Image: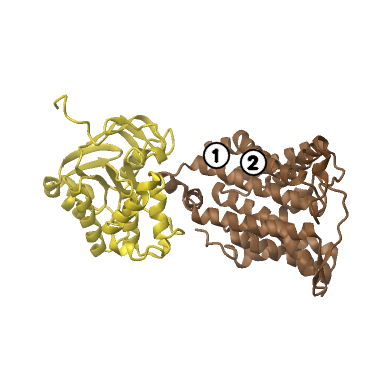
Chain colours: A yellow, B brown
């Protein structure tokens, strides 16, 4: 790598993380995502995929190693600071505030922005998601699974993140809705936002990703361009007997 | 039934409602039942008494009753300072006790037991400093004004009702119309997600302590003004406050006020119909019935 190359949009260095100090789930992961990439993290159930992204987002304690966002060390920054640095995270479940309205969900995310741009940012995101914009005063808890996922993504986009991380956005959605969500993610990535995706739905994910990494037992075992991994027997082997797409992983 | 029951019940209920708002806010955001909340009431009342007396010593004019009320300007001035002091006390207790337990991810039962400890300590301290002899904000006598329909109320009682209504509306608007209110509701629903969205959860917790304590202080001053100040005044209100918070639905401010009024009216009605010795049982019966029949309360959402 040349010395003038920009730092990766997101990187981890020997990252060890887990809920309990003596029980690391992610065991020394070195992982880089270049700006503009759409990378999918694959792996069997319990491999530590969710834990890895939650640790980067600040929801799971990091025991050792580092996480970097555009070269800046974010290992120790508290969860609410990371979004201010440009890292947006969409959890797998309970990723919207069901008791708040759609408008309030979006406004909550906009509250960390300067007051004069808040309305403008919400309007821009509503243009991207006209279905949500049409029922802004509805309680988010009344939305369907697919609409909730769209709202979670819309809310993450309010702050114009540089990196968007999603933990299994296809979980619990019908194949048709998964197609819609993934098409939307591809558009968002094409607009310049780096995306990292944890997925069980291997086929759908590899179809939109540039690159995939495979996590097994908390370690990064394999990586490569999405197109070649889709044909790779190792992927088929890892997923043989694995749970069908949409099933929850770990905790 | 004597229509005066309505007035008595509403006035006691307004006081319960104010205290219950603090309970419901801290419960829904800190996620444990803080049994030391009642001691914030007592502390607030005594702090106002001490400050009001001090102001009276500085200037006797401040003790002259305002219009039809039984107290002078020293009390409202002292009340504002006492609200701030009660808020600081709540922050101090959080810093030395609950905050440390949160960092250790202590279980809810540990937090609840710690709150019992805090309550006992604060109550004993107040008893030590102010003695267990009842105290009064004022010795002025008040004539109850006829309200029509055979009901009467003193100007102090009517003022207490008005202040309670005003504060409920203010807190409701704060929660529904402002950024900090939005953050509070977000933290109450899902603390982890609130952090992900950029909410500073620790700041929200501090605001909740300040707000809950300030409301407790006002409720305590009301209790002191309408009845008397005793070190056990808060403790005696504990059951009605929790009954109101749970009947209203944890997290619901209008629910807490509505339920406070219901508990107050039920108590007053019971005293009339059955007998004064059953008064304290009313809140308990309401609490048990709500938990059995509608655990989410009147205006609360079902708990996951």
Left or right, B235 with respect to A22, comes to: right
Q: Which residue is drawn at 57% across and 62% down?
A: B296
* Whole-percent x, y for residue B5 in the image: 79, 69
Circles 2 and 1 on the same subunit: yes
Judge by depth and name the residue closer to the eye, A47 or B190.
B190
Q: First in sequence: mark 2 or mark 1? A: 2
Q: Which residue is drawn at 49% across and 43% down?
A: B201
Judge by depth and name the residue closer to the eye, B152 or B211.
B152
Vertical position of residue B2 compared to residue B124: above or below = below
Q: Which residue is drawn at 30% across and 38% down?
A: A218
Q: Mark 2 lies on which chain?
A: B
Left or right, B300 with respect to B263, comes to: left
* Whole-percent x, y for residue A37 in the image: 19, 42
* Whole-percent x, y for residue B187 in the image: 49, 49
Q: Which chain carries label 1?
A: B
User: Which numbered dot is residue B87?
Assistant: 2
To which quarter of the image does residue B249 belong? bottom right
Query: Neighbour class for label 1 at 10 Å: few (<14), some, many (≥20)?
Result: some
Marks 2 and 1: which is nearer the front? 2
Q: Name the residue under label 1.
A: B102
Vertical position of residue B293 compared to residue B142: above or below = below
Q: Is mark 2 on a helix, strand or loop?
A: helix
To which quarter of the image does residue B36 belong? top right
The residue positioned farthest toward the top in the image shown? A3
């Amino acid at each position: 790598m040349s010395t003038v190359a920009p730092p990766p949009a997101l990187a981890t260095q020997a990252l060890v993380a887990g809920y309990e100090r003596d029980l690391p789930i992610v065991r020394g992961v070195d992982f880089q995502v270049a700006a503009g990439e759409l990378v999918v993290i694959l792996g069997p159930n319990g491999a530590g995929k969710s834990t890895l992204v939650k640790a980067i987002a600040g929801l799971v304690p990091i025991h050792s190693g580092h996480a970097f966002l555009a070269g800046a060390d974010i290992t120790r920054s508290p969860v609410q600071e990371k979004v201010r640095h440009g890292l947006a995270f969409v959890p797998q479940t309970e990723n919207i505030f069901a008791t708040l309205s759609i408008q309030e969900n979006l406004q909550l995310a906009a509250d960390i922005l300067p007051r004069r741009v808040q309305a403008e940012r919400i309007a821009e995101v509503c243009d991207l998601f006209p279905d949500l914009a049409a029922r802004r005063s509805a309680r988010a808890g009344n939305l369907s699974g697919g609409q909730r996922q769209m709202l979670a993504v819309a809310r993450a986009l309010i702050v114009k993140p540089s990196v968007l991380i999603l933990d299994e956005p296809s979980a619990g959605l019908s194949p048709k809705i998964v197609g819609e969500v993934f098409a939307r993610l591809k558009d968002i990535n094409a607009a310049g936002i780096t995306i990292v995706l944890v997925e069980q739905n291997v086929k759908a994910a590899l179809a939109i990703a540039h690159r995939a990494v495979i996590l097994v037992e908390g370690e990064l075992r394999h990586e490569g361009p999405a197109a070649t991994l889709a044909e790779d027997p190792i992927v088929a082997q890892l997923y043989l007997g694995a749970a069908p797409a949409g099933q929850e992983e770990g905790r | 039934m004597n229509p005066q029951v309505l007035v008595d019940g509403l006035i006691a209920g307004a006081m319960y409602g104010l205290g219950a708002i603090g309970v419901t806010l801290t419960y829904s955001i800190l996620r444990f039942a803080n049994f030391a909340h009642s001691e914030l009431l007592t502390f607030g009342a005594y702090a106002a008494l001490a400050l009001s007396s001090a102001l009276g010593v500085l200037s006797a004019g401040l003790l002259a009753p305002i219009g039809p009320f039984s107290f002078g300007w020293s009390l409202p001035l002292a009340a504002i300072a006492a609200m701030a002091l009660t808020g600081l006390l709540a922050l101090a207790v959080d810093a030395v006790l609950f905050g440390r337990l949160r960092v250790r991810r202590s279980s809810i039962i540990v937090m609840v037991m710690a709150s019992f400890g805090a309550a006992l300590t604060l109550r004993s301290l107040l008893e030590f400093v102010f003695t267990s002899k009842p105290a009064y904000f004022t010795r002025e006598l008040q004539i109850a004004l006829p309200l029509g329909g055979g009901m009467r109320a003193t100007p102090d009682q009517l003022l207490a009702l008005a202040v309670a209504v005003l504060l409920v509306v203010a807190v409701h608007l704060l929660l529904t119309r402002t950024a900090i209110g939005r953050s509070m509701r977000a933290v109450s629903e899902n603390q982890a997600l609130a952090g992900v969205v950029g909410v500073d959860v620790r700041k929200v917790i501090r605001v909740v302590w300040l707000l809950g304590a300030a409301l407790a202080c006002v409720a305590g001053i009301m209790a002191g003004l309408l009845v008397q100040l005793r070190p056990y005044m808060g403790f005696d209100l504990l059951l009605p406050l929790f009954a109101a918070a749970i009947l209203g639905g944890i997290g619901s401010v209008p629910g807490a006020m509505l339920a406070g009024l219901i508990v107050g009216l039920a108590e007053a009605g019971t005293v009339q119909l059955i007998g004064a010795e059953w008064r304290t049982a009313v809140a308990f019966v309401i609490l048990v019935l709500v938990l059995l029949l509608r655990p989410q309360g009147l205006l609360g959402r079902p708990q996951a």
